[in-house]
Structure formats: structure tokens, C-alpha cells
Amino acid sequence: MTDTSLEAVLRQDKLIIAACMTALTVMAWCYVLWLARSMNIGDMAMSGMEMGAGSHDMVMAPEPRSWTMTEFAVMFSMWVIMMIGMMTPSASPMILLYARVGRQSALQGKPLAATGFFLGGYLLAWASFSLVATLAQWALENMLLLTPAMTSASKFFSGILLIAVGLFQWTPLKDVCLKQCQAPIVFIQRHGGFRRHPLGSLGLGFRHGLYCVGCCWALMGLLFVGGIMNILWIAAIAIFILTEKLVANGHRVSRLFGLGLCAAGVWVIGRAVF
């Protein structure tokens, strides 16, 4: 390939990276939609079996049960793919910046590690979070705080969770992590610049992903309130995360949202008590 041809290809890196991230996000959302539909059909079938058993039969209260390794693997995979669909769009400014600087460095004869390593590190951080989320789901199901449809089984629990997430939106940790996510250039400068070695790029992406997890982990707790497979709820959370990272006054948006969550939590608990 001639130098002119190579330069022409490199100039398209932004478009190529954007297309790859879009395809990755679309595939993740398609899987989540398919999984949600499959689970809804399963829940409807189970309800029909319970009704068909005879109206004179008493419906037994659910009992805690242990997951099999297969069930755990399925749930973990579900969380990982859901995080990819929700978080890849909000990471696009950083990833596109990496791709642009990589192109310029390649033209100067000092190529960086491929952008895929940085993206891989970012997604690895969210895969680690997915493991924690899967364990949390397992624990909540064993405490009978989640229904088989993976929604909150207790209004009191929902209210407490809403208030907790709302308060987190006002914490210094939220502000620090959000600032790191909002300013890609500042993040790169504070963490030693771009990397040429693949492992260095992977580690940089992982570190950026950890800041993103620190910023958004509590918001993912809202999935236990509205339903882990509630597509509208998932989309609403993803849109809010994207908004607070992209708008100039994202911290104000975050805090206003936190106030709204606290108010909603108090209202839900009030309904549960009275």
C-alpha cells in the first residue's frame, strides 16, 4: 500500500470507529430486546400455568433458591451486553479522540496502539461491574426483594434505593468521576498521555472505564426498581447518562435528577407505609 493510500485510509478512522461503535451498540440492544421479549413470554407462560392449575389451589409464596452455574453465566452475560449497549455511546467522545490522535501520530511515524485496545479496556471495567451486579441480583433474589421478572418486590426497598441513588448524585465521588468522563483531554493529560503499547492502551481504557463506573454505578441500581429487562427504563437511564456527560452543566443536571429521585423515593415509601 502506498503512503497516499495509507493516509487516505487513516483519514477515515473517525468514520470507521464510529461505525464500529454504532454496530456494537446496536447488536447489544438487539440482544437485550430479544432477551426481554423471551423473558416476557416465559413469565406469561408461567402465569398461565399457575392459573390453569385450578382456582382452588393456593399460590405458594416464592422461596429462595440457588442459581446454577449456567444461570449465573447467563445473567452475567446479560449484564455485560446490557452495559455495552448503555455505556458505549457515552464513551464515544473519548474513543473518537483517541482515534484522531492515533491517526495524527501514525502520519508522524509514531503510531499508537490500536483504538480497539482502549475500547477493550473500557468495556473490561464494565464487565467487572457486571460481575458485581450479577452477584447483587443473586443476593436480592435470595432475600426475596426481586420478583422472577427481575423487578422490585418491595415498595419500601424501591423507595430506599431511589433515595440512596438520589443522594449519591450529590457526593464528591460523583462529581470527581463525572468531571473525568466529561473532559477527555484532561483525563489523558492527567494519566500520562496516549500509549503506544497495547497493554498500556488497554490499561488506560480500563482506568477511564473505572471512572465511568464510579460515576454511574449507582444509577444502574435503578434497574432493580424499574425492572432489569424493562427496555424503556433501560433506555431512559442510558439517555440520562449520556446527557449528564455531554452537557456543559452536567453536574447540575445530575443533582437536580438526584433531588427528583429522593422525592420519588419518599413518595414510594409513603405509599408503602400509609
Image (cartoon, rainbow, N blue to C red):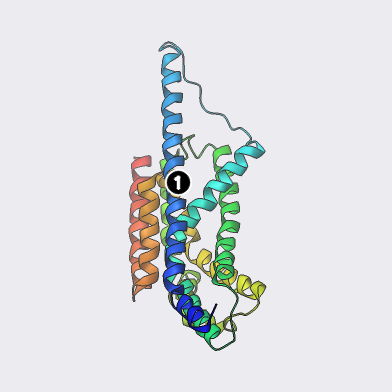
The foreground one among 7 and 263 is: 7
Q: State whether residue 135 is above or below residue 58.
A: below
Count of all numbered marks drawn on residues in the image: 1
Q: State whether residue 76 is above or below residue 57.
A: below
Q: What's the residue at 62%, 80% (across, down)?
A: 196
Q: Is residue 243 left or right of residue 195?
A: left
Residue found at the far bottom of this picture: 108
Indicate the position of residue 13 as horizontal and vertical percent values. Answer: 46, 73
Indicate the position of residue 214 as horizontal and vertical percent values. Answer: 52, 66
Q: In this rendering, does residue 40 appear at all?
A: yes
Q: State whether residue 201 is above or below residue 41.
A: below
Q: Is residue 223 left or right of residue 194?
A: left
Q: What's the residue at 53%, 50% (across, down)?
A: 79
Q: In this rendering, does residue 186 appear at all?
A: no
Q: What's the residue at 36%, 56% (across, down)?
A: 261
Indicate the position of residue 238 as horizontal and vertical percent values. Answer: 40, 58
Indicate the position of residue 87 as horizontal and vertical percent values. Answer: 46, 61
The foreground one among 73 and 12 is: 12
On-image quarter of the N terminus: bottom right
The foreground one among 108 and 153 is: 108
* Label 1 Cα crowd, 10 Å radius (few <14 / some 14-19 / many 20+): many
On-image quarter of the C terminus: top left
Q: Which residue is mark 1?
A: 32
Q: Secondary structure at mark 1?
A: helix
Name the amino acid type tagged 1: Val
Q: What's the residue at 52%, 28% (across, down)?
A: 62
The foreground one among 165 and 150 is: 150
